[in-house]
Image: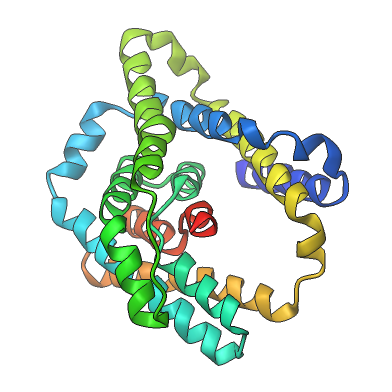
Amino acid sequence: MQAIITIGILLTFSLLGLYVKEPFSRLMPAVPYLLALIMLSMGITLRSADFFEVFRRPARIIYAGLLQFTIMPFLGYSLALLLRVDERLLYGSVLVGSAPGGTASNVITYLSRGDLAYSVSMTTFSTLISPVMTPLLTYFLVGKRVDVPLYSMTRDLLLIILLPVIAGIVMRRLFPRVLYLERILPYIAVFFIGLIIATVLALNADRLRGSALSVFVLVMLHNLLGFLLGYTFARLTGLDRIRSKTLSIEVGMQNSGLATVL
């Protein structure tokens, strides 16, 4: 039932963003705050013990980073060549594939009942190594140099992901009554996600409606194959289904906002 409600809410906001642009296009400055509120709501569902369990096996985090920075860049490059897109789309596909994980992967993990502590840890690790990996991969694959905005990326990691999650964990410990909200927190998060989706779509509605089919196919295949390969490699190394699903989401969903800036 929760999945049906979630899909319904997100589809509604998507259509509103595409066809009723004006109210949502003004919300862009609020997006970082909405993301922070989403991460705060996630933090309330976590305990510090969840992270200690993840950190007991750091190899899992490193392995996820290795998969993310191999599968997605080379997949983006291969698909762009296969579909014969123009040079700009080839570069963009590689750049998105070479970006670290983003908040979206944490949100989807949360909604799909994955291992949220593992997801946040993987996002943090991939973000920290991206100043080296992202320029290296883009130069190797397409011969383009990029400079990763280390300061703003680290600031966003702290303010939008880590601090809200920590605040949520502290609230859970100091104010146990917030646990009564646990049942409705996913719906609150979905509502905020819907607002963000509508905002992004409203700002890009004209370009999206006029996009070529090849762009849509490229994006869909890039994500879907990333999910599939991430899950497959996770299972091959003996991870259980929940952590395999979590790793799959982290591998398949990149920080496209950072890629856009670059």
Q: Position of residue 51 (x, y in %)?
A: 23, 36
The relative height of residue 214 versus residue 108 in the rendered view (above or below) is: below
Would residue 224 appear left or right of 70 to someone viewing this image?
A: right
Query: What colouring does the structure picture have?
Result: rainbow
Q: Position of residue 191 (x, y in %)?
A: 66, 34
Q: Is residue 239 visible?
A: no
Would residue 162 appear left or right of 55 to someone viewing this image?
A: right
Identified at 27% across, 49% down, the residue is 128
Q: How many marks?
A: 0
Q: Position of residue 1 (x, y in %)?
A: 64, 42
Q: Is residue 88 visible?
A: yes
From the viewer's side, name the closer residue of 203 and 11.
203
From the viewer's side, name the closer residue of 62 and 2.
62
Q: Quadrant of residue 50?
A: top left
Q: Quadrant of residue 218?
A: bottom right
Identified at 35% across, 76% down, the residue is 139
From the viewer's side, name the closer residue of 183 and 115.
115
Q: Quadrant of residue 9?
A: top right
Q: Position of residue 40 (x, y in %)?
A: 45, 26
The relative height of residue 110 versus residue 95 in the rendered view (above or below) is: above
Would residue 56 appear left or right of 237 to someone viewing this image?
A: left
Identified at 30% across, 70% down, the residue is 136
